[in-house]
């Protein structure tokens, strides 16, 4: 087969699934590393093979050993991080770059944006806006911070992903009940503690960008119109945010960033300014950007191959996209029951109601018929038992998130962790669930 061979870092997340669609429509074919051989990526005509590996958060060194073994034995032209594994690839960059094309920022740059606490410090350094934020290292400190910031506010772990490790606190009584939440009790013991953040106002939006050695190559911004599972967008609209573009240019240059970078923020229409809340130092959800004129995933592949793409033109900015899986998971999580799940599924597939004029980003049945298997599986499970939603999403997030592995690796080197020793490469591969990811 002609064309570069691409290996994706995981295949369980909706983020990976969007990257697969964007790259598949550009003519690429891909393989995937994932703990689950029946992961979401498996059900795509653009994916040829799933290499089983340990979960990157539970066993990051074992995961990297498997990736190195696959790169050595199979030969891939590009290793593409489509989730938090970008942090691992930057950490082990010197051991990976001789084996494949890889576009990631220096590890020192990742340490400044991989956690919410570090990102907040960077925003303060660059004088960029964010909601008032305090850090707590004990439970009493969490309650004091909530009282000081006012209600409602948010308590967050520094290393959570996909809106895990985030809890809304509506009043003083709710703040005092936090002592009974296990992850909060554990979180205050972590080096970064817990972040307590004031409520931001405005529309939830995301900016998705690609940088080449600190210079912005392309950026697209979109607004969440309908909330899906774990805060993800079930329906989004492309928007134009020159102020966010200027801020991203400053961030990229300050970090000498290379590769994909995204950020979540709230946009205040009246003030005409953003308030940044969470970093995503990697390629994220590229399909709305593709529908609005720029294939960010393709740009990252080209940069991995050593190209230096010209800055993308402004293009279109108002295309809508939706994600059937996010929509039905969100309906179930909100307590909509079987009727709610099926009603939302029908509207998303038929593109009626609020989904009128939108295009499917995750499971586009016309261009990728195999995706119907994954969509049908999730809708079927939720229509039978909507209460499974939290277990489904939690098991999927476990397949690709890093969690405390970030802290574990930050104080050591690949050599000290034994990654350079290939005698045990792949020994821990082959673990994982047997069901399609939700």
Image (cartoon, rainbow, N blue to C red):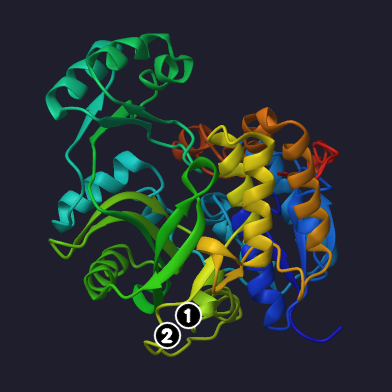
Would you name the residue on which mark 1 appears?
292
| Residue 182 can be seen, yes or no | yes
Tell me: residue 222, above or below residue 429.
below
In this orientation, does residue 395 appear? no
Q: 438 and 235: which one is in front?
A: 235
User: Where residue 6 sits: x, y (%)?
Assistant: 72, 71
Residue at 36% over, 26% down: 191
State the count of labels: 2
Q: Going by the image, does 10 lie left or right of 284? A: right
The quarter holding residue 199 reads top left
Q: Residue at x 47, y 44 (%)?
A: 231
In the figure, 367 relative to 64: above or below?
below
* Vertical position of residue 382 compared to residue 298: above or below: above
Which of 188/226 is in front? 226
Considering the numbered disc 2 on the image, is that residue within a helix, a strand or a loop?
Answer: loop
Question: Which residue bears the numbered disc 2?
Answer: 316
Q: Earlier in the sequence, mark 2 or mark 1?
A: 1
Question: How far across and down, in percent of the image, does residue 337 sit?
Answer: 64, 34
Q: Quadrant of the C terminus?
A: top right
Give the residue displayed 76% in from the left and 68% down from the top. 365
At a point 63% along the width and 60% down the height, the residue shown is 348
Residue 427 quadrant: top right
| Label pair 2/1, CB-CB below 8 angstroms | yes
Left or right: 120 with respect to 41?
A: left
Q: CA distance from mark 2 to mark 1?
A: 5 Å
The local crowd at label 1, few if under 14, some if 14 to 19, many if 20 or more residues have their Cα within 10 Å, is many
Q: Is residue 225 left or right of residue 81?
A: left
Is 314 left, or right, of 142 in this rendering?
A: right
Q: Residues within 10 Å of mark 2 (few under 14, many from 20)?
A: some
Residue 177 on image: x %, y %: 35, 11
Q: Secondary structure at mark 1?
A: loop
Q: Position of residue 61 (x, y in %)?
A: 65, 40
């Amino acid at each position: 087969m002609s064309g570069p061979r691409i290996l994706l870092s995981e295949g369980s997340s909706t983020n990976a699934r969007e990257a697969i669609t964007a790259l598949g429509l550009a003519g690429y074919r891909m393989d995937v590393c994932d703990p689950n051989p029946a992961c979401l990526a498996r059900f795509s005509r653009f994916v040829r093979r799933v290499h089983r590996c340990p979960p990157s958060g539970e066993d990051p060194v074992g995961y990297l050993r498997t990736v190195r073994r696959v790169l050595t034995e199979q030969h891939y032209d590009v290793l593409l991080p489509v989730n938090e594994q970008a942090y691992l690839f930057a950490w082990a960059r010197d051991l990976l770059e001789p084996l494949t094309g890889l576009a990631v920022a220096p590890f020192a740059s990742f340490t400044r944006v991989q956690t919410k606490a570090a990102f907040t410090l960077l925003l303060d350094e660059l004088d960029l806006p964010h909601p008032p934020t305090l850090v707590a290292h004990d439970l009493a400190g969490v309650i004091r911070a909530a009282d000081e910031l006012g209600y409602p506010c948010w308590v967050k772990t520094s290393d959570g992903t996909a809106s895990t490790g985030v809890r809304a606190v509506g009043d003083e009584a709710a703040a005092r009940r936090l002592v009974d939440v296990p992850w909060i009790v554990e979180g205050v013991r972590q080096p970064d503690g817990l972040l307590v953040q004031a409520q931001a106002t405005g529309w939830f939006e995301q900016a998705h960008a690609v940088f080449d050695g600190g210079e912005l190559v392309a950026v697209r911004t979109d607004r969440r119109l309908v909330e899906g599972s774990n805060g993800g967008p079930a329906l989004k609209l492309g928007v134009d945010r020159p102020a966010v573009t200027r801020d991203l240019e400053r961030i990229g240059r300050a970090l000498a960033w290379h590769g994909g970078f995204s950020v979540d923020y709230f946009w205040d229409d009246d003030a005409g300014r953003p308030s940044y809340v969470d970093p995503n130092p990697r390629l994220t959800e590229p399909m709305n950007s593709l529908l609005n004129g720029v294939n960010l995933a393709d740009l990252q592949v080209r940069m991995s191959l050593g190209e230096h793409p010209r800055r993308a033109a402004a293009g279109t900015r108002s295309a809508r996209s939706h994600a059937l899986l996010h929509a039905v998971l969100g309906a179930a999580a909100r307590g909509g029951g079987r009727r709610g799940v099926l009603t939302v599924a029908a509207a998303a597939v038929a593109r009626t109601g609020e989904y009128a004029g939108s295009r499917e980003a995750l499971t586009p049945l016309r261009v990728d018929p195999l995706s119907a298997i994954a969509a049908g599986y999730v809708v079927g499970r939720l229509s039978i038992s909507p209460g499974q939603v939290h277990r489904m999403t939690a098991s999927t997030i476990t397949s690709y998130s890093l969690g405390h592995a970030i802290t574990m690796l930050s104080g050591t080197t690949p050599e000290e962790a034994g990654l350079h020793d290939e005698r045990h490469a792949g020994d821990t591969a082959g673990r994982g669930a047997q069901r399609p990811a939700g």
